[in-house]
Image (cartoon, helix red, strand yellow):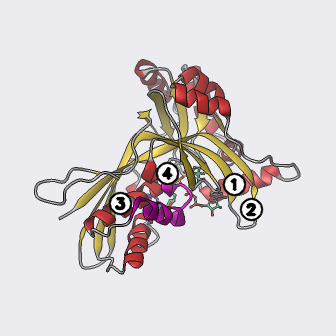
C-alpha cells in the first residue's frame, strides 16, 4: 500500500519584508501564488524511516532526517504516538534552493501522505499547525491557490483569484540560501527605517480581477535587491525576459529563480524561447497559476481511497 501526494511550487507576487525581529525572523506581507510545477511525495510502510529522491536537482536534496519530508513524518508520528516506519520517495520537479518552496512542498506532501497512510486523523487545523512548525512557507504548500501570509509568512488568509495567470520561470545555475538572502536584506537596510510590511491593495485587486497587466504593475519583492547583490548575474536574466516581452520580471522569493509574468500561452512560448537562447540561465519552464494545494492522488489498484486535502 502506498499514498502519493502532489504539491505545487509557489511564486511570491508580493514580498514585503519588515525589520528583523528579536527571534531572527522578519514579519512579512507575503502574497503567495501556487504555480503548476509539482513535486510528488510517495509514502509506504517500511521497517524504518528512509528518504529517496529522483528528478531535477535530486543530488542536492538531503536524504537524512533534515529533509523536510522526513521532519514532517516524524512530527506527525510523534504527536500521534505512531512509529515513523515509512519509506518516503520524492519525485522532484521543483528546483532546489530556488525560491519556489520545493522543500516546503515536500514537507506538506509527506505530512498529508502520512496522515492518509497511517489513518492518523489529524484535522486540517492540526496539519496547518505542524506545517507552521516545519517552516514559514510550509502551510501555503498545503493550501495552494493564492494566500496572504503574515507573521513570518505562516499565518494565511486565502485570496480570490479571478483568472489564470501565465508564467515563465528561469532556473539559475546555482541556488541561494534563504537565511543568507535575509541577512543581506538586513545589511542593505542598515541605517534606514524599514516600514511595516503591508499587502498592496492594487495587487490584491489585480489578482481578484485576473488582470495580468494590473498584476504586472503591482508585483514587488523586497528581497530582490538582496538576491541581486549576492547573485548579480540575475539582472541579465531579468533583462532578457523583459526584452522578450514579459509584462513583469522579478526574482521568486529569495531567489535565484526568476519569474516572468506574460499575457498568454503564445507569449509564454516566446519569452521561454528567448530565455533559453539568452545563455543567462540553466533551464526554463512555463506554468500557469493558481494551482491547487497538496492533493492525494488517486491510488493505483487496490490501495487506499483518494481523499482531498
Ligand atoms: C523567502 C520565502 C518567501 O516565501 O521563501 P523562499 O524564497 O525561501 O522559497 C520564505 O519567507 C522563506 O520561508 P522558509 O523557506 O519556509 O523559511 P524558514 O525555514 O521558516 O526560515 C529559514 C530562515 O529564513 C529566514 N526567514 C524566514 C522567514 C521569515 N519570515 N523571516 C526570515 O528571516 C530566517 O533566517 C530563517 O532562519
Ligand atoms: N525535501 C527537500 N527538498 C529540497 N530541499 C530540501 C528538502 N528538505 C530540506 N531541504 C534543504 O532546504 C534547502 C532549501 O531548499 P528549497 O526548499 O528547495 O528552496 P527555497 O527555500 O529557496 O524555496 C535546500 O538547500 C536543502 O538543503
Secondary element at image label 3 = helix
What residue sits right under mark 1 in the picture? 27
**198 left or right, relative to 252:** right
Measure the C-alpha gap from mark 3 to mark 2.
Answer: 31 Å
- Marks 1 and 3, how far apart in space? 27 Å
* Local SS, label 1: strand
The residue stretch that appears in magenta = 123-140
Type of secondary structure dominating the magenta stretch = helix
Q: Residue 140, labelled with which disc?
A: 4
User: Which residue is labeled 2 in the image?
Assistant: 21
Res 206 quadrant in image = top right
Side (left or right) of 222 relative to 144: right
Above or below, comparing residue 63 to residue 237 in the picture: below
The quarter in which the N terminus is drawn is bottom left
* Ligand 1 within 8 angstroms of badge 2 C-beta: yes
- Characterize the local packing of mark 1: few (<14), some (14-19) or many (20 or more) Cα atoms within 10 angstroms: many
Q: State the CA–CA distance, disc 2 to disc 1.
A: 7 Å
CB of mark 4 near ligand 1 (< 8 Å): yes
Image quadrant, ligand 1: bottom right
Counting labels gives 4
Relative to the observer, which residue lies in front, 93 or 20? 20
Closest to the observer, 243 or 209: 209
Q: Earlier in the sequence, mark 3 or mark 2?
A: 2
Q: Circles 4 and 2: CB distance less than 8 Å?
A: no
**Label 1 CB sits under 8 Å from any ligand 1 atom:** yes
Q: Is residue 135 magenta?
A: yes
Q: Are marks 2 and 1 in contact (CB under 8 Å)?
A: yes
Q: Are marks 4 and 3 in contact (CB under 8 Å)?
A: no
Using residue 6 as the reference point, say whether residue 255 is left or right of it.
right
Amino acid at each position: 500500500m502506498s499514498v502519493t501526494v502532489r504539491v505545487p511550487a509557489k511564486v511570491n507576487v508580493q514580498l514585503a519584508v519588515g525589520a528583523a525581529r528579536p527571534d531572527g525572523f522578519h514579519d512579512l506581507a507575503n502574497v503567495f501564488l501556487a504555480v503548476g510545477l509539482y513535486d510528488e511525495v510517495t509514502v509506504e510502510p517500511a521497517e524504518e524511516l528512509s528518504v529517496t529522491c529522483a528528478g531535477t536537482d535530486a543530488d542536492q536534496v538531503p536524504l537524512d532526517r533534515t529533509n523536510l519530508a522526513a521532519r514532517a513524518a516524524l512530527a506527525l508520528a510523534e504527536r500521534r504516538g505512531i512509529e515513523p516506519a515509512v519509506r518516503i520517495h520524492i519525485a522532484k520537479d521543483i528546483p532546489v534552493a530556488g525560491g519556489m518552496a520545493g522543500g516546503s512542498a515536500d514537507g506538506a506532501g509527506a505530512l498529508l501522505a502520512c496522515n492518509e497512510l497511517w489513518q492518523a486523523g489529524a484535522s486540517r487545523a492540526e496539519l496547518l499547525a505542524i506545517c507552521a512548525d516545519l517552516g514559514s512557507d510550509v502551510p501555503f504548500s498545503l493550501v495552494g491557490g493564492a494566500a496572504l501570509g503574515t507573521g513570518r509568512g505562516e499565518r494565511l488568509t486565502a485570496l480570490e483569484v479571478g483568472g489564470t495567470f501565465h508564467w515563465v520561470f528561469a532556473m539559475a545555475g546555482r541556488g541561494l540560501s534563504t537565511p543568507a538572502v535575509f541577512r543581506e536584506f538586513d545589511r542593505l537596510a542598515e541605517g534606514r527605517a524599514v516600514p511595516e510590511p503591508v499587502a498592496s491593495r492594487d495587487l490584491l485587486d489585480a489578482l481578484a480581477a485576473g488582470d495580468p497587466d494590473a498584476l504586472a504593475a503591482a508585483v514587488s519583492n523586497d528581497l530582490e535587491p538582496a538576491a541581486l547583490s549576492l547573485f548579480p548575474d540575475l539582472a541579465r536574466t531579468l533583462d532578457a525576459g523583459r526584452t522578450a516581452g514579459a509584462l513583469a520580471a522579478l526574482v521568486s522569493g529569495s531567489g535565484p529563480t526568476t519569474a516572468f509574468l506574460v499575457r498568454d500561452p503564445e507569449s509564454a512560448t516566446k519569452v521561454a524561447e528567448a530565455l533559453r537562447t539568452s545563455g543567462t540561465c540553466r533551464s526554463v519552464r512555463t506554468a500557469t497559476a493558481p494551482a491547487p494545494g497538496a492533493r492525494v492522488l488517486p491510488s493505483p489498484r487496490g490501495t487506499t481511497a483518494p481523499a482531498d486535502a
